[in-house]
Image: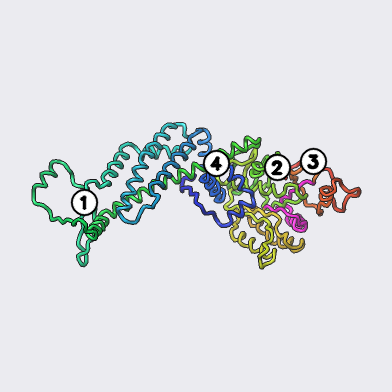
């Protein structure tokens, strides 16, 4: 997953990750990537909630995914091998490792003896794919395993583990410290059992003592003494067992992600939607461009066809989306957010083509239903949430706002929006905002039109519904749309401010 760091799919998520998942409808993507496997779902959620902001790592993941896709079956075999090793580890340590040196030694030896044949299987598995592996990630894994886990090394490991069974007893030395307490315990190789050792036994005998049968306190004292003697070796064995387990944990998490990615692409493809490998702009090029972009979550949920949209910001940092109710504005916003998160965790994007900057953060600010138990008003609660979001932003971030400041009147909400969102975009943050506040949209057009992209959702009944066109905002509440939805036909006299009923094609969005 990265040339520099291991991928960790822990149970916890970053602050705000669950809200973002809810805002963008990512649960559908996670569910398909998981395909009923909790480990795969956890890996998918961890990747989507921690987008990568490094071009080299993104290329690393894209190449690894292409390599695994070309070598069908390898990801599954690697995942199964790692899962089996971890399951066996858990079986052997079901009651824990234990704190005493003897318990650590015994359990660690068992675990490592189980891991050795699994490492041999892994080496043979990778060797079977040989020169077919082309990506730096899989080629590097293959080369490291073949070089570091050769027969000579594994034979040496087996030999050490056999000695650590302590079948012939324990040999160690110690020095006397303060008050004649033992110190500097050091474990030694067990004595040889050959002819020289037997002849040496005929010489002067060393001083010995025996513990009488039934002397429980004496046996406990002897056990403590032996524990001190093997403590260093037992700790080293436990560390080795933990290290090998860590390797299999990373292997399982990373292959789980790639398995999820391949399954996601297959499911989306089976529904007739295109996917592409995203490209990333660098330097001063901050344009976000997409062709036939769809909301991946909606593609997975909707039984009907999802309408695609095109997008080209041409470097404009503020994108204002206005227009008809239920015209696809929120769906379009989600399609941008989901696509960017998928791109920045190494996944294909649901589009024919997608090109975007690498943002350091992708943040959402969607309207929330008022909490009935809240002491603060709706606007105050929203501003508190927004404040927390703004503290995370930088000039290289992406902020997606859906109906912000709708908790107050139009004049006040528009003024807040103009004072917050426009300066953010001027500083370099890429801002997308869906709004019904005409004063907000028109104020941005009037004072910042040259640096703002305006998209408008079509009205019901117009050509290509749910597609957005590049057009300035309109001073209308779309009453005719509401009238048609309620009464089934347009009024005889057009409502004041209603938009004309004809339209032409353009760029757009998807979904109801």
Q: Which label lies toward us, 4 or 2?
A: 4
Which label sits in the foreground, 1 or 3?
Answer: 1
- Give the SS element for disc 4: helix
Under circle 3, the secondary element is: loop
- The spot of residue 449 in percent (x, y) is 74, 53
**How far is disc 2 from disc 1 in space, using C-alphas?**
75 Å
The residues tagged by marks 2 and 3 sit, at their Cα atoms, a distance apart of: 14 Å
Q: Earlier in the sequence, mark 4 or mark 2?
A: 4
| Residue wearing tag 3 | 463
Gap between marks 4 and 2, in whole Å?
A: 26 Å
Q: Which residues are magenta?
A: 432-459
Marks 1 and 4, how far apart in space? 51 Å
Front residue of this view, candidates 110 and 321: 110
Q: CA distance from mark 1 to mark 3?
A: 88 Å
Which of the two labelled residues, at mark 4 and mark 3, occupies the earlier sequence position?
4
Q: Nearer the viewer, mark 2 or mark 1?
A: 1
Does the residue at mark 2 contact the one at mark 1 (Cβ under 8 Å)? no
Label 2 or label 3, whichever comes before in sequence order: 2
Q: Which residue is mark 4?
A: 260
Question: Residue 25: horizontal and vertical position, in percent?
Answer: 64, 49
**Secondary structure at numbered mark 1:** loop
Q: How many marks?
A: 4
Taking the magenta stretch, the answer to whether it contains residue 464 is no
Question: Residue 356: which quarter of the image?
Answer: top right
Q: Residue under circle 2? A: 309
Q: Is residue 68 above or below residue 203?
A: above
Left or right: residue 41 versus residue 462 is: left
Asked if the residues shown at circle 1 and circle 3 are in contact, with their CB atoms under 8 angstroms apart, the answer is no
Tell me the residue that label 1 is attached to: 171
């Amino acid at each position: 997953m990265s040339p520099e760091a291991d991928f960790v799919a822990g149970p916890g998520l970053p602050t705000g990750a669950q809200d973002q998942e809810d805002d963008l409808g990512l649960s559908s993507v996670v569910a398909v990537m998981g395909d009923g496997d909790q480990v795969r779902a956890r890996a998918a959620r961890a990747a989507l909630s921690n987008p990568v902001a490094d071009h080299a790592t993104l290329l690393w993941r894209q190449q690894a995914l292409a390599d695994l896709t070309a070598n069908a079956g390898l990801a599954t075999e690697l995942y199964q091998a790692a899962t089996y090793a971890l399951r066996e580890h858990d079986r052997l340590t079901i009651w824990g490792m234990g704190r005493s040196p003897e318990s650590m030694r015994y359990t660690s030896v068992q675990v490592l003896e189980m891991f050795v044949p699994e490492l041999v299987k892994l080496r043979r598995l990778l060797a079977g794919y040989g020169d077919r592996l082309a990506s730096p990630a899989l080629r590097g894994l293959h080369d490291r395993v073949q070089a570091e886990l050769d027969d000579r090394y594994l034979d040496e490991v087996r030999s050490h583990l056999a000695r650590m069974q302590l079948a012939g007893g324990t040999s160690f030395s110690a020095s006397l410290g303060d008050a004649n307490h033992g110190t500097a315990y050091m474990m030694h190789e067990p004595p040889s059992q050959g002819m020289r050792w037997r002849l040496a036994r005929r010489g002067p005998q060393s001083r010995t003592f025996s513990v009488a049968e039934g002397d429980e306190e004496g046996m406990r004292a002897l056990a403590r003494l032996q524990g001190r003697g093997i403590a260093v070796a037992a700790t080293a064995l436990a560390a080795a067992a933990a290290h090998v387990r860590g390797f299999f944990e990373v292997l399982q998490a990373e292959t789980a992600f790639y398995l999820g990615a391949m399954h996601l692409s297959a499911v989306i493809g089976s529904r007739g939607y295109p996917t592409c490998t995203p490209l990333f702009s660098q330097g001063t090029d901050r344009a976000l461009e997409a062709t036939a972009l769809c909301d991946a979550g909606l593609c997975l949920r909707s039984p009907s066809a999802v309408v695609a949209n095109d997008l080209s910001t041409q470097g404009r940092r503020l994108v204002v989306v206005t227009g008809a109710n239920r015209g696809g504005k929120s769906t379009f916003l989600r399609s941008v957010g989901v696509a960017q998160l998928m791109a920045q965790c190494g996944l294909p994007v649901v589009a024919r083509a997608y090109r975007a900057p690498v943002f350091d953060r992708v943040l959402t600010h969607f309207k929330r239903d008022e909490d009935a138990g809240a002491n603060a008003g709706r606007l105050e609660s929203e501003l508190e949430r927004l404040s927390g979001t703004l503290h995370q932003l930088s000039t290289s971030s992406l902020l997606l706002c859906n109906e912000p400041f709708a908790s107050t009147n139009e004049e006040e909400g528009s003024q807040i929006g103009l004072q917050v969102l426009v300066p953010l975009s001027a500083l370099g943050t890429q801002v997308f905002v869906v709004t019904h506040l005409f004063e907000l949209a028109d104020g941005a057009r009037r004072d910042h039109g040259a640096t703002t992209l305006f998209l408008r959702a079509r009205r019901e009944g117009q050509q290509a519904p749910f597609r957005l066109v590049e057009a300035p905002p309109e001073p209308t509440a779309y009453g005719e749309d509401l009238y048609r939805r309620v009464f089934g036909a347009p009024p005889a006299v057009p409502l004041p401010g209603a938009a004309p009923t004809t339209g032409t094609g353009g760029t757009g969005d998807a979904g109801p």
